[in-house]
Image: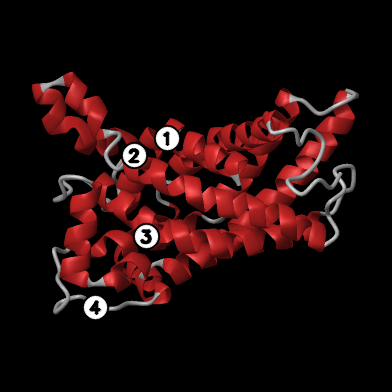
Amino acid sequence: MASGALAGAVEHTAMFPVDTIKTRLQVAASGTSYAQAIGTLTARASAANAANAVRSLYRGVSAAGLGAGPAHAVYFATYEKCKVAFGGGNVNEHAPVAHALAGVCATVLADGLQNPVDTVKQRLQISDSPYKGALDCVAKTFRNEGVRAFYRSYPTTLAMNVPFTAIHFAAYESAKTALFKASEAEKEGFAVQFAAGGVAGGLAAAATTPMDVVKTRMQTQCVLLDCDVAKTVETTPMDVARAIVRDEGALALTRGMSARVLFHIPAAAICWTTYEAAKRAFGLDGDDAFGHR
């Protein structure tokens, strides 16, 4: 759990500016380019102070960093336990189904912790966010929309993260095994883990971008529309997806894909290498978190 918490915090804080750009692209109207997305982030700030422009890329990073720790602790601990339970505990064994199922179990639990944090993070990331900070966002969201606002996108998050995690963990373990054998090294090292993590993160991110666009819209719609409890329309993920396709075209569901892949390739590589390094530091070199080889 400690290794997972450290990995999650490092991953989300290191890649946060790219995540901010991805969020801005997904909530923007169709046709917005990378340059325009970055421009909306920094236009006012850069005119006054370059430091403010950089700082705007990190709005919400405190929420992301604090929330990622506990969520990833649960995520990785659940994964390690379930991986063994499903028969994929041998590090030399190729068992993609066991790894995928373990990843699915992990994400269902971890997303329960992560979803409220992700909602706060994305509301702070959008252009002209009305909130002063994370605590202000929590207080105003709770007062205006109730506790349900923090979990409005949870079903959508699961619909995205269940296949994301299944692809991610299966691809990571498979790529690590393939690269480990190809390297002909006595032990898998940093390069193998970094490369395998990047491959897994990129594949999973590209495949699940449409659901990420829907999730982002659901988490930010009341800020963008300035709606309160009385005016909030509870929409399903399919309602949101249909509205996006109707108003902006099917390609709108791929908005931010490049930024999302650009985020997840290094983020997954950073996360996995940090996790594996932390396990070695805690004396679990060659074992999973429960002592199984």
Please state the horizontal and vertical placement of residue 278, each as a whole percent of the image: 64, 32
Sequence-first disc among 4 and 2: 2
Q: Identify the residue under disc 1.
A: 13
Quarter of the view holding residue 184 = top right
Please state the horizontal and vertical placement of residue 73, each as a whole percent of the image: 56, 49
Residue 61, label in figure:
2
Q: Give the mark toward the camera: 4 or 1.
A: 1
**Neighbours of disc 2 within 10 Å: few (<14), some (14-19), many (20+):** many
Q: Is residue 148 visible?
A: yes
Compared to residue 226, the image places residue 193 above or below, namely above
- Residue at disc 1, secondary structure: helix
Q: CA distance from mark 3 to mark 1?
A: 17 Å
Q: Amino acid at mark 3?
A: Pro
Q: CA distance from mark 1 to mark 2?
A: 6 Å
- Residue shown at 10% from the left, 24% from the top: 47
Please state the horizontal and vertical placement of residue 28, each as a whole percent of the image: 27, 51
Q: CA distance from mark 4 to mark 2?
A: 29 Å
| Proximity of marks 1 and 2: CB atoms separated by less than 8 Å | yes
Q: Give the mark toward the camera: 4 or 2.
A: 2
| Residue 291 in the figure: left or right of residue 248 | right
Q: Give the mark toward the camera: 3 or 4.
A: 3
Q: Identify the residue under disc 3.
A: 116
Sequence-first disc among 1 and 2: 1
Sequence-first disc among 2 and 3: 2
Q: Amino acid at mark 1?
A: Thr
- Residue at disc 4, secondary structure: loop
| Residue 18 in the figure: left or right of residue 2 | left
Q: Could you say which is closer to the camera, residue 242 or residue 225?
A: 225
